[in-house]
Amino acid sequence: MPRTRAALLVPTLGLASVLLLSGCMPSVSDIVEDATGVSVDETGATIETDEGTVEVSTNAEVPADFPAELPQPDGQLVGVITTPGSWNLTYEGVEADAVDQMIATIAGSGYELVTDGTTADGRMASYQNDQWVVTVIWDGAEGGSKALIYGVTTR
């Protein structure tokens, strides 16, 4: 992806995500589509690039092409971003023991540890095998939404 296109893609995804989550889509979707070429509706945004399609969705379903051998956490799926060979799933309401179980399942499935760190309020772990790089980032701060970002990328 050329640098200028990549530089525009990140802010566009951010804008689309904010608009999706704020419920402002019907009033601004036409403006966003006209200005950026991004296809936007009430369930998400689609961006066509030379390398493939980037989708941002508030549709609470794990994509059909997500690697089936990887575990899914207990919690509510609230956002999905996909690109060719890459998935970023965002969950809320994920408890620490569910995160620990997910990570244990990944580690026990032959994935090699890349990094694993724990704080009083969260955890970040990354594992890889010959096919995937899997990253789990969890925020368990008191009073927060217990958000989990689950990223999988082709290696």
Image (cartoon, rainbow, N blue to C red):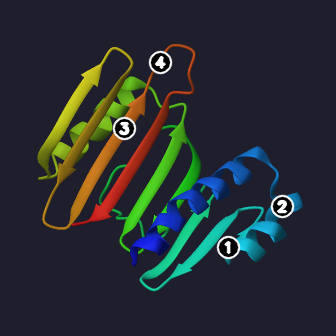
Q: Which residue is mark 2?
A: 28
Query: Image height check: is 56 above or below 92?
Result: below
Marks 2 and 1 close (CB-CB < 8 Å): no
- Left or right position of 51 against 93: left
Residue furthest toward the front? 4
Q: Secondary structure at mark 1?
A: helix
Q: Is residue 105 left or right of residue 31?
A: left
> Do the residues bearing badges 4 and 1 touch, measured as CB atoms within 8 Å?
no
Q: Specify whether residue 48 is in view.
A: yes
Q: Amino acid at mark 2?
A: Val
Quick one: label 4, few (<14), some, or many (20+) residues within 10 Å?
few
User: In which quadrant of the rendered image does the N terminus lie?
Assistant: bottom left
Q: Is residue 39 visible?
A: no
Nearest the eye: 90 or 111: 90
Q: Earlier in the sequence, mark 2 or mark 3?
A: 2
Residue located beneath label 4 in the image: 141
- Cα separation between marks 2 and 4: 33 Å
Q: Dot 1: within a 10 Å radius of its alpha carbon, few (fewer than 14), some, or many (20 or more) residues? A: few
Q: Which residue is mark 1?
A: 36
Question: From what the image shows, is residue 111 above or below residue 50?
Answer: above
Image x and y of residue 81, in percent: 51, 60
